[in-house]
Amino acid sequence: MRLVQPDEKMLAKKTWKNESFLIVLLMALCLTLFFFHLGARPFWDPDEGKHATTSKDMVLNGDWITPTFNGEPFYDKPILYNWLAALSFLLLGFTEFAARLPAAVLGSGCVIITYLLGKRMFNPAVGFLSAVILATSGEVIVLSRAVVHDISLVFFVTLALYLFYLAYKDDRHKKRNLLFFYAASGVAVLAKGPVGLALPVMIIGFYLVVERKLSFIKQMHIGWGTLIFLAVASPWYILISLKDPDYAAYFFIKQNLGSFLSSDTQHPEPFYYYIPVLFGGFFPWSCFLPLAFIYAIRNRLETVRKGTAFLVIWFSVVFIFFSMANSKLATYILPLFPAASLLIALLWHDLLSAPPPGIRKAFLVSFLPVVMIFSGAMIYLWASPPVEIEYESGIKLNQINLLALLLLAAVFLALFFLLAKKDSAFFTAMVGMMVTALICFLLLLAPSLAPYRSTKKLAQKYDQLTPPNEKLVFYRRIRESALFYANRKARVLKTNEQLEEHLASQKRVFCFISQKRLSDLKSIPYVIDQEGDNLLISNKKAP
């Protein structure tokens, strides 16, 4: 099957029916990966507990402008995901499923847009493969099931770039697509701040330079586009800045510009930080990335030059931009995942349709490191079992060994299909490995891990023992999920002296404390309840 050029009319009515079937398959995959057991586990600290509580406070306080956490303004993140979670709470109640639902929907949206972009650039087969690759990459699965802001940025940046590409390639509806591009960029700014505009602008700018089409800028309706962008992005920023004049300086200068340029950041990492992060976050498909880049540059830039060049620039801009920043987190490079998925899908498309000479050997060379890593990890688990892991996380060794064996079996099954030249089965085994890993994690590991990552049980116990509106008390650090489940404010005792003074009260008082911190106390208090390695203690016996 040859690659079809973007300007060819390649789809007959029968093909459209097949395409509908592909979309149904993608939605079934998304339902499995992003929605299965979505509300089964409690919120995990710190991020999920904090963002869920902030969204819940928005509903209870009726203030949809200023996000707050523990009664204080929370300015570290923009407002979009809080709005989406708050709306979900209004419709479905204050549940874990409701808080995570926007992430699952946005993750599914990313998969569908990647399919549409691959279909427009190449053909439906490439679009389908790229969408499956994106859906089954590790970090996309995690962030499409968590109460965090990153997946909303990825969705709207991907949507903006898709709309730009439509306008660039097709004069039909050009103005409409460009104006929607500006609107999507505005929402991306509401999702994560200025980077929501910076990434599309840099990608498009470099692309037009490479294509020697800077004249296209004159066709981009920048005047109307700017008005639309500002109409979408600016009202909330203006309103919150009017309520708090310090907000703009804090968010734009300290949180954004400062995190990029200042050496005094919360998450300083070396320049090469994202190389191993990309391998782990985009697993299992990341092992094919070097081959995909070589293949694209050697074989694609002439035949489908504009599409492939766009993807290479998209990937490179995001990777280099965040690598240059002083503050780095693993989730920052997620916006490059759709481009990486499309580049790898081109590679797989040729393997599955008309394999050129040497491509299977190249796949084997790319996949062997995965086989070696999994085999080495299994040997390490047997030779040096991490016996302390159950105490630290609640996960039992037999659970880890079972999951490791299943994954190793899937890896060797995939290798067998590759060596047997059963290429479709090879791809299916890769997908099945990720689906199996997720289901095993949700059913086997997550229930054991949850008590060590959440304080739901202790917060509910505290509710039973104390009058309404009495503050939660924590020693050393707050457990964010407790504020959601107890619907209370909290205070933190920073020193041993403050804790001793608190427990010396004549009335019954309580405190959340980690088990290892009990040694800070001169006398052992009453342990009312335990959840993982967290304790609820009191100076008196519980009634």
Image (tube, rainbow, N blue to C red):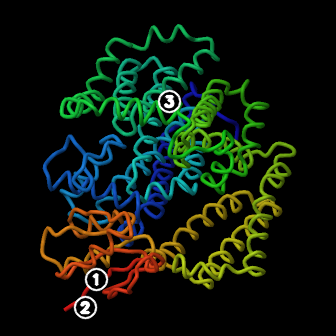
Q: Which residue is mark 2?
A: 541
Q: Nearer the viewer, residue 269 or 349?
A: 269
Q: Which residue is mark 1?
A: 538
Name the disc covering residue 135, or none: none
Separation (CA) of disc 3 from disc 1: 51 Å
Residue 73 spot, x, y in % from top left: 25, 46
Q: Which tag is nearer the camera, tag 3 or tag 1?
A: 1
Q: Nearer the viewer, residue 391 or 281?
A: 391
Q: Which residue is mark 3?
A: 199
Residue type (three-letter) at the residue carrying disc 2? Lys
**Residue 464 sits above or below residue 40 on the image:** below
Sequence-earlier tag: 3 or 2 = 3
Q: Residue, x 79% and y 58% (percent of image)? A: 369
Sequence-earlier tag: 3 or 1 = 3
Residue 88 image-quadrant placement: bottom left
Q: Nearer the viewer, residue 186 or 422?
A: 186
* Image quarter (top left, top right, bottom left or bottom right) of the C terminus: bottom left
* Image quarter (top left, top right, bottom left or bottom right) of the N terminus: top right
